[in-house]
Amino acid sequence: MGQELLTVKNLNKSFGGIHALKDINLTIRSNEIHCFAGINGSGKSTFIKCVSGIYEPDQGEIILNGRSYSRLSPQEAIEKGIQVIYQDLSLFSHLTIAENIAINKIMNSKKRLVSQKEIYSVAQTQLEKIGVEMDLNATVQESTMANCQLTAICRALAMDAKLIFMDEPTTALTGKEVKRLLTIVMDLKKKGYAIVFISHKLDEIFDIADKISIFRDGEIVGDFERSELDKKKLSHYMTGREVEYPRYVRTFQDNTPLLQVDRLGQKENYQDISFSVRPGDILGLTGLLGSGRTELGLTLFGLNPHNEGSIFFEGRELRRLTPGLMKSLGIGLLPEDRAAQGLFANRSVKQNLSSVVLERFSRTAGLLDQKEEERIAIEISTDMNVKTSSVDAPVSTLSGGNQQKVVIGKWIASKPKLFIMDAPTVGIDVGSKAEIYDKIQFYASQGMAILLISDEIEEIVLNCNRILVMAQGRQIAMIEEEERLQASQSELEEKIMQLISEENPLPVQTQGGAVV
Amino acid sequence: MRKRKVINRTEWFLIGIIFLYCAMVTLVNPAFLSFETLFDILRSSAVTTIMAAGIMVVIISGGIDVSFTAVALFGAYVTTKILTETSAAWMEHLGIAFLLSIFMGIIWGLLNAVIVHKLKLPAFIITLGTQNLIFGVMTTFIGSKTYGAAAIPKVFSRFASAQLFRIHTASGTIGVSSFVIPVAIVLALTWFIMYKTKMGRSIFALGNSESAAMRIGINPFRVRLFVYAYMGALAGVAGVVYVSQVRSMYPNALVGDELSVIAAAVIGGTKLSGGQGKLLGAFLGVLIVHLLNNTLIFLGLSSSWNDFFIGALMIVSVSVTAYQERLKNRKHFIFTE
Ligand SMILES: Nc1ncnc2c1ncn2[C@@H]1O[C@H](COP(=O)(O)OP(=O)(O)OP(=O)(O)O)[C@@H](O)[C@H]1O
Ligand SMILES: [Mg+2]
């Protein structure tokens, strides 16, 4: 067993009326991967922020390397060897990827001067360490979510910290990158680091955990060795109930196609895609990062013009697609990058929820009916089970997962005919996932057509009555309704996994940890 | 991987405008294209360039300062008063004048930083307040006398007439004003601070996101102290250059110029929301503003056209930057509209 690195005693933290952490007692040791699990809003991120010096605890003691503190400053925490990959990444959007990766190291070195060469070499070394390639001169603002997340990971790894907190570091990553990150985490553990890892993907937890601490409602309800738990027990401890995911079967009668896509292509991103969607269909679109799934989804919302093939909606060919036109036709998009595209962070939950359905309660002369706005906001947030002190609280004070529920809720409330959802349950806890699946399936059974883009194969197979598999911009398989009904859940998962991995062989691991 | 560009699009755009404009003026009036005009612009833009470098730093840090013209005036006025009233001969030295003025600038800058940071109010409002405060302190406690050309200390007029080097042309001998020395020093120093020091990195980081900057251990208060004090110091330098240039000192000189300095920085691609800006751009912005200022007469236009052109340029420049950003984002499937 490793030595004690960090011990926390009776830690308490409240925000106004919300008691976010209640008497937390916890020890983190070196040579150990310690996973935190817990539903959205249970206090995981708040715990990290108390230890890394962002929040001042109301009460309690933080013992670091044998010294006791009632509070730390961010500077002290960094000096004592704590690094955090924050859930919101916390990057500098106008600075380049290279500058973002190197900035921690540079700010905390003894030298007062900075050289561009050093920035590059720090960044390059980190990228090689995790085995990815990126344009180091692109700014964060113009980079994809996945690249931003990789940047935040590199930034923390550059510091040679003793204790690294990783708050949902894999939300925007898929297959290859996740595997690579988990390998690195295991390596770090062997070298004597302590890692705290948070994820709502339970597979990841069971892949790497030594210890698992379960948060519920601001308390730790149990500390376990990995061997003492399985997925079922873990989700039971997290939610306090049995979690059962519903399986979708289409019952809607109308078979006239709503959306038809014919040999659609776009230069670098996807080619030769053909499919049609009927009301009540939940069409799954799956494939790895870079398979073109997200880009295809954006095209269908008028955001990424195609240059080959044609698109028909309700029998009419659409020629000039714009988001405005698509919205007026009744098409909604839940984008992949929620932080930038879906939410007004400093506005209240209420204002965010009402932004899509504004016309529904704007009276004559464009005046808003405030009572109605409030009523609808409360209705949606209860429906989606959003955890917030009130609908007037700014969205930025919600936990990461609850922010996402707000985005999904606001779109569903506008009742689109076709709803394109890109990675709808990333960062959502196991319990709330069931509720969201219920909701998606309910609306589909009422006739809403849904295009579900996701790389969680379990999610795709459960919810989609038809599944389109993509790899490197091509449509490699279409699993139709009959096939899905005949095969079992695990057979289908197996099949899709097979299809994807054939097209994208994973890098072979050699002994030194290098990628060939 | 993409090369990092030394000159970005906004800057190419400004360079293009400068060339086009010069070509146009030359067509109308060939007398324009001369070393004399060039040296004239270099000289007359000295004060603005120095202040623009300072305001660029403040804006990049996510702040704003509209009190710097008042600070420059204060430094210049008080220095003039001290130099004219002192009997100690050693005080009559240009170096002393700069030091005095810079010192007063730093004091006012630190005050700005403390109030902006502690009160957590918009820096625009705070510095608008200090601007008035500084004028008030000066006219009530120090004096409101006007110093004419005869009363100005000799060091200033010597500094103004000194020339770095001369060249001989058909129309006579013309020289490069010694004002380019403080300008060059300020530009070099600002460049060095912004791109070569940890403080520079902190300034960019703070302007991008205060909370993210704090999370990596940056102390926003320290950065603000530095940034506003630096602005104050440069305002002090600009003040001394200013008295030397105009060879007189009114208690209301420079008033109202702060917005055109900010305009120059913004035309040069400095983002008012913070976190982004380049020195070359800001410098080009100043050049354009002064080019218009000095040469509209060559076109036979009255100076009121100046405002029109600067306004138009600012709108075009800001929209070009914003449009390019949108295109860039589109390429990466990031949509904010
Ligand atoms: N700055 C803040 N102001 C007010 N309330 C806050 C603030 N930060 C967190 N909270 C509240 O504290 C609770 C715990 O939030 P926290 O972010 O720690 O959850 P979490 O376990 O990380 O959830 P998730 O899995 O969704 O990320 C939530 O109810 C949240 O609304
Ligand atoms: Mg969290």
Image: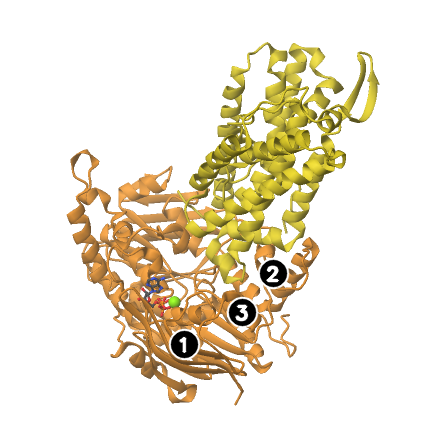
Chain colours: A orange, B yellow
Cα distance, mark 2 to mark 3?
Answer: 13 Å
Host chain of mark 3: A
- The picture places residue A271, in percent across and down from the top left corner, at 47, 51
User: In the picture provided, is A393 more to the left or to the right than B129?
Assistant: left
First in sequence: mark 2 vs mark 3: 3
Label 3 and label 1 in one chain:
yes
Picture quadrant where residue A451 is located: bottom left
Above or below for B242 versus A148: above
Name the residue: 58% across, 45% down.
B229
- The picture places residue B126, in percent across and down from the top left corner, at 44, 41
Numbered label attached to residue A107: 2
Quadrant of ligand 1: it is: bottom left
Label 2 and label 3 in one chain:
yes
First in sequence: mark 3 vs mark 1: 1
Q: Is residue B281 visible?
A: no
Above or below for A430 versus A364: below
Q: Amino acid at mark 1?
A: Phe
Host chain of mark 2: A
Q: Residue furthest front?
A: B87
